[in-house]
Image (cartoon, rainbow, N blue to C red):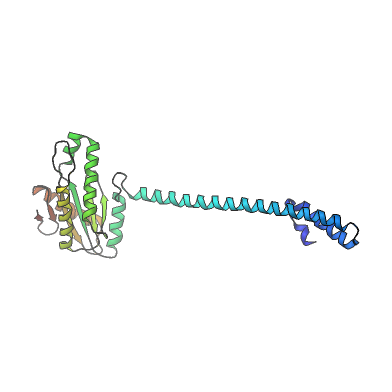
Amino acid sequence: MDALGDASDLFAAEHRALLAARAAHAAGPDGAHAALGELLAAYERLLRETRRLVRRSDRAELEMTQLNQRLQDLAGELQYRATHDPLTGVLNRAAIIERVNQLFARSGLTLIVLDIDHFKRVNDNFGHPIGDQVILGVVACLQQAVPAQGLIGRVGGEEFTLLLPHDDPESAEAVAQRARRAIEAHAFGLPDGSRVTASFGISCMPCGASFDEAYGQADQALYAAKRGGRNRVAHAGGDLQLHD
């Protein structure tokens, strides 16, 4: 079969013109001029159709690229929503637990648990929108105090965890005290002009521990800080140590 016989129906007219030109060429000069004219016209139609198809293909490729980018953006957005607290933008409880357990598989770490002192009173006296403002202000203070390699997670309404990728009590103490002082000094703008403070519990655990173990110890230290007068930092282990 002639190779041109495989041409699609889209170019059938061009194919017929080419066959006629071949026949005219084989028969001699008579009629060759007319056949050449038909061939030129068919070739022009072919060019127009090819350009149209190329433009359509370019548009389809652009649309596909845009669609793929949108799908990637949506996937990233869904991943972010699945791992971050909607109010504050810090990691949510499930995400911080996952990160802590992943890190414990490779090294020791520090978990700091903090709770806003008398937060229920803020909500009861001024309403939840003011309470949300306080939470956002606390997060801003934590973001200033926590080093770049650390992570912040919200594990409850007014309770947060700070993950530090080392198990050094002195470094953990410095971070917790920096955060505590930042919250104490922050102007939250409460209607009655009162200040906001937070209490902190620190747990430094070796490689191979788990979130539940670290959180349990840090939570005990946190309650020791609450019992000790609030606006304090307490360390877990042995005898709980309180620091103003």
Is 6 drawn above or below residue 140 in the view shown?
A: below
Q: Is residue 14 visible?
A: no
Q: Is residue 185 visible?
A: yes
Q: Is residue 182 left or right of residue 106?
A: left
Measuring 18% from the left and 53% from the top, which residue is drawn there? 179
Quadrant location of residue 194? top left
Quadrant location of residue 24? bottom right
Is 121 drawn above or below residue 109 in the view shown?
A: above
Residue 224 in the image, given as x and y percentages of width and height: 11, 51
Quadrant location of residue 214? bottom left
Q: How many marks?
A: 0
Measuring 80% from the left and 56% from the top, which residue is drawn there? 39
Return the residue nearer the eye: 185 or 51: 51
Residue 89 in the image, given as x and y percentages of width and height: 30, 48
Residue 79 in the image, given as x and y percentages of width and height: 38, 51
Is 196 drawn above or below residue 15 in the view shown?
A: above
Measuring 22% from the left and 46% from the top, which residue is drawn there? 137
Return the residue nearer the eye: 57 or 38: 38
Residue 156 in the image, given as x and y percentages of width and height: 24, 45
Q: Quadrant of the N terminus?
A: bottom right
Q: Is residue 14 left or right of residue 150?
A: right
